[in-house]
Image (spheres, rainbow, N blue to C red):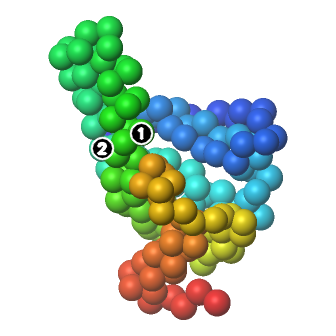
Amino acid sequence: TDIVYKIYLLQDTATINAYTLGGKIFITSAMINKCTSDDQLYAIIGHEIGHNEKGHIKSAIKQLKASNKYFGKWGETFLVIKRFLTGSFNHKNELEADYFGLDLAWKLGYDVCAIRSFWDDMAKGEERNSIIDFFRTHPYSDTRSKCLVNHIKTNFEVECK
């Protein structure tokens, strides 16, 4: 697309997060510190770019506009409730953005296997709970690690150790 991306650093040392709003990518200092290499950081930034390039942001904006049109001042509230109740359906978009980020990192010569240790580290301490699982907006970190390693093996013919 014709999006010009700008990256903004948020001085937040407690929240490991990155997100995008159109061409603006926001990344917390905690996320920067969690990444042990540029390879990991680029895969994370590529993930956010993937949300834009795959149309996830455009779709969310359309949903917001439609919700406001049909529910008026309650539109945003309705959308928040909908997202709360259907959060687990977002896993597909998250993995699609993960794959996009890795594909981009691969094209630019980054070590795509580096993302495995990032997600393996993030998985430490994550507990599964069938009730909470339904409301999660992102796949579990160990699931992401396995899916990405499989993506790397299938698409780049590289075995991550």
Residue sitting at 37 percent across and 42 percent down? 85
Residue identified by numbered label 2: 55
Camera-side residue of 146 and 25:
146
Q: Which of the labelled discs sits on residue 19, or is there none? A: none
Q: Do the residues labelled 1 and 2 touch (CB within 8 Å)?
A: no
Name the quarter where the C terminus is drawn: bottom right
SS of the residue at dot 2?
A: loop
The image position of residue 97, as x and y in percent, is 42, 56
Camera-side residue of 84 and 95:
84
**Residue that protrudes farthest toward the left in the picture:** 70
Is 22 on the left-hand or right-hand side of 60?
Answer: right
SS of the residue at dot 1?
A: helix
Is 59 on the left-hand or right-hand side of 107?
Answer: left
Say which label, 1 or 2, has the lower sequence index: 2
Residues packed near mark 1 inside 10 Å, few (<14), some (14 to 19) or many (20 plus): some
Residue sitting at 57 percent across and 51 percent down? 45
State which quadrant residue 57 falls in: top left
Q: Which of the labelled discs sits on residue 84, or is there none? A: 1
The image position of residue 88, as x and y in percent, is 39, 53
User: In the displayed structure, would residue 145 be above or below residue 84?
Assistant: below
State which quadrant residue 142 falls in: bottom right
Whether residue 105 appears in this view of the structure is: no
- Which amino acid, mark 2? Gly
Name the quarter where the N terminus is drawn: top left
User: In the displayed structure, would residue 134 be above or below residue 23?
Assistant: below
Q: Distance between the residues labelled 1 and 2?
A: 21 Å
Whether residue 31 appears in this view of the structure is: yes
The image position of residue 30, as x and y in percent, is 77, 46
Residue sitting at 25 percent across and 22 percent down? 67
- Which amino acid, mark 1? Phe
